[in-house]
Amino acid sequence: MAHEKYQACVQACNDCADACDHCATACLQEQDVQMMARCIALDMDCAAICRLAAGYMSRDSQFAAQLCRQCADVCQACGDECAKHQHDHCQACAQACRRCAEECRRMAAA
Amino acid sequence: MAHEKYQACVQACNDCADACDHCATACLQEQDVQMMARCIALDMDCAAICRLAAGYMSRDSQFAAQLCRQCADVCQACGDECAKHQHDHCQACAQACRRCAEECRRMAAA
Amino acid sequence: MAHEKYQACVQACNDCADACDHCATACLQEQDVQMMARCIALDMDCAAICRLAAGYMSRDSQFAAQLCRQCADVCQACGDECAKHQHDHCQACAQACRRCAEECRRMAAA
Amino acid sequence: MAHEKYQACVQACNDCADACDHCATACLQEQDVQMMARCIALDMDCAAICRLAAGYMSRDSQFAAQLCRQCADVCQACGDECAKHQHDHCQACAQACRRCAEECRRMAAA
């Protein structure tokens, strides 16, 4: 069943969305918020598309693979930005983003 | 940290959203779709508010508790409807909904 | 300002999302729901990606154009399916979907 | 028809979501981002619940009124915060939020 076939990717998308939402809030509380502006903006984009992708996969949408390909690009950009910052929430987010980008690419290629 | 404090509830919301999205699609493929109409409608409402609630909690929003209280009501209604149908996807969804309703009520009361 | 540059497309996305959500509910109340199953499934996909695209454009995301290209594909598929059904809500939805597909393509090409 | 009955409120929710998303991005580009942190956080909450409420109303959900009551609270808080800042995007957002709070309360009371 599609639902189960996609399980690893759905899980990675949910985890990534939560990590991005958490990172955005934590960035807003950092002393140098200005340095985190691009990180926060990408966190918002990434959380939103990850939740959409999870929904598409869970509904076994005919557009799920196409959406995951797009989601991977956003995750990659967000992960690359987060990786530049030493805050724990950024490093954790970078890891979740990169794992999700990988799962999304694998899913889109299957 | 709020993020971690809410972890069980965020997880329950993500699981419930995925179960609802899956149930909606599976219901649409049942022979007697008409009998599943209310189930599908509630699945849509429930998946959407669960994903919103997960985001609010992950962002440690000041409205997270209030939103979870509302989310519990939708989960309860969706779980009650799903429980009436014998399809596996409905029974699985009913269970995810009820677990999520419980976690959301606990979170809102904390 | 980007916000204003995208105004026609944001408006088309919001209108399309609302038309799809309305169409899904109305389809569920039709006598022959089974015949509407694909329409309902595409309505869900289309409403969700249109709301995401509106958000990306309003935030002037670097991924807005890419997302609109994807959104156009979903709108096209949803509009093509809706156009096959004579119900008023399907015809109205088909029109909103096609208008949105057009605006999204124009936006993505700009 | 419910869809049309709610039209003013759906429109106000869509406008408010777009204004909040735009305000969040514009705040992130202000020189004193730190001063805008609470504004940005509320913009995110408000945009997300407004889009959810628009969907609930367009689907004529049984939970639409309850959701609009909740949406009004978030809009009120976001509007009050935005109103404190002199930036054009904050003033425009405050206005959209307050109008949406009003429409949501009217809808919930009907």
Image (cartoon, coloured by chain):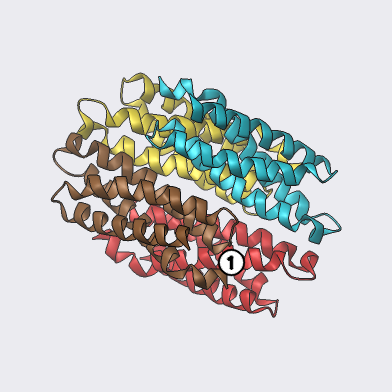
Chain colours: A yellow, B cyan, C red, D brown
Q: Visible in this render: residue D107?
A: yes
Rendered residue at 74%/67% (across/down): C36
Q: In which image quadrant can residue A90 be found? A: top left
Residue D63: give x, y in percent of width and height.
Answer: 57, 53
Q: Please say if C29 is above or below B109.
A: below
Residue C64 in percent (x, y) is at 39, 54
Query: Is disc 1 surrounded by few (<14), some (14 to 19) or many (20+) residues within 10 Å?
Result: many
Residue at image location 40% in from the left, 57% down from the top: D105
Name the quadrant containing residue B16: top right
Name the kind of residue labelled 1 in the image: His
Residue C34 lies left or right of residue B14; in this view the side is right
Instruction: Write down the chain letter for disc 1.
Output: C
User: What residue would you read off at disc 1?
Assistant: C22
Residue drawn at 48 percent across, 32 percent down? A18
Please determine whether, in this image, residue C103 is positioned above or below residue B40. Answer: below
Q: Is residue A83 above or below residue B75?
A: above
Depth check, front residue: D49 or A27: D49
